[in-house]
Amino acid sequence: MKLSPKSSDARAPAVPVEEIDFAALARAIKGWGRELGFEQVGIAGTDLAADEAHLLDWLDQGCHGEMDYMRRHGTKRSRPQTLVPGTTRIVSARMDYWPAAAEPPQAVLEDPARAFVSRYALGRDYHKVLRRRLQQLATRIERRVGHFGYRVFTDSAPVLEKAIARQAGLGWIGKHTNLINEKAGSWFFLGELFTDLPLPLDTPAQAHCGSCQACLDICPTRAIVAPFRLDARRCISYLTIELRGPIPRELRPLLGNRIYGCDDCQLVCPWNRFARPSAEADFLPRSGLDSATLLRLFAWDEAQFLRHTEGSAIRRIGHVCWLRNIAVALGNADPHPEIVAALNARADHPSGLVREHVAWALERQRRGAGSTADRA
């Protein structure tokens, strides 16, 4: 994958490098980014050596679980010039997604009959939104300097996006391994534009977690095994989104009613008191996913699932994993005849994965395990 112009064939010729005021261009890029809906844009270099060492150690410890693609990509993730030859700078951008109009997350988490979906997945797939805006940003740059080399990424390639964003001054990587901005918290998406333009670098952000370890203490499955160290094999986001096989039995009770992702570490982070509601209509809740009951979502057949998740990041897990996740949540819910009936209706599902989790949930319901997440 090489840097290449990505707009129309009728491109303006490149302006000679010596005629470009790159400091002025960087200021313009940041302004255009804000006009396109990004809250902040920064510029980073390509040296991620320290982050590469952390990544390789994390992989050696097996913390990536079954995400084998992370090891297959090797050092492409930490060496931008290997991923995209010709890259000299990375334009990093962030866009807020906190859906203020959604049902309060804590109210949903405290109601075992309802389904909790991570706030980032309630609306339109962020990949589509950010990729389009970044392409528009690249087009504006091209109008200024003529054709230039670039590639746009939004969690769509082996990119160390949080490390790049830190180097670009957008925030620091917190103890929960999410990026935190001191003025906006952590409820935002990231996207990148790899380019060959020698833009001036921004100052990397400094960490401000201090002695706080609220995220470590709140994690339901103790997936944050140490500050700045997440074991994906225990993370609810991994278990409900990335994992395609059975969810480990000992972890199922700890999922509670979380059926797609987990926001606990962000909900408890004190920096998120500065979070701002998203201005993007695309990130508003769809299909009532911010307050839906488990029984309603469990009743969706595959056609309904595909219809209700059209344009959503949720669709990529597929109907089988959707049912698997909800079955676990129903097993954790307070015992109720309606739940038992719904589970029995799926007991002969064609998928062995669904049948296994339904059987587990039925046993939990029969034993009256309810929502006591500490019982296996």
Image: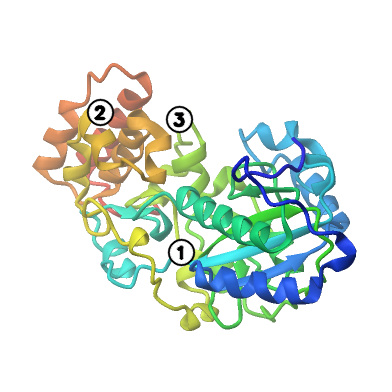
The image shows residue 69 at horizontal and vertical percentages of 67, 33
Look at label 1 and name its amino acid. Asp
- Comparing 216 with 58, the one in front is 58
Q: How is the image coloured?
A: rainbow
The image shows residue 57 at horizontal and vertical percentages of 81, 47
Label 3 vs 2, first from the N-terminus: 3
Occupied quadrant, residue 324: top left
Residue behind mark 3: 246
Occupied quadrant, residue 136: bottom right
Query: Relative to 266, is 139 above or below?
Result: above
Residue behind mark 2: 302
Assign a secondary structure to mark 3.
loop
Looking at the image, can residue 201 be seen? no
Label 1 vs 2, first from the N-terminus: 1
Q: Give the class, few, some or many, for how many residues have Cα within 10 Å of label 1's Cα (few <14, many ≥20).
A: some
Residue under the image location 48 percent in, 28 percent down: 245
- Comparing 144 with 80, the one in front is 144
Q: Which mark is residue 264?
A: 1
Location of the N terminus (image quadrant): top right
Residues at marks 3 and 2 touching, judged by CB atoms closer than 8 Å: no
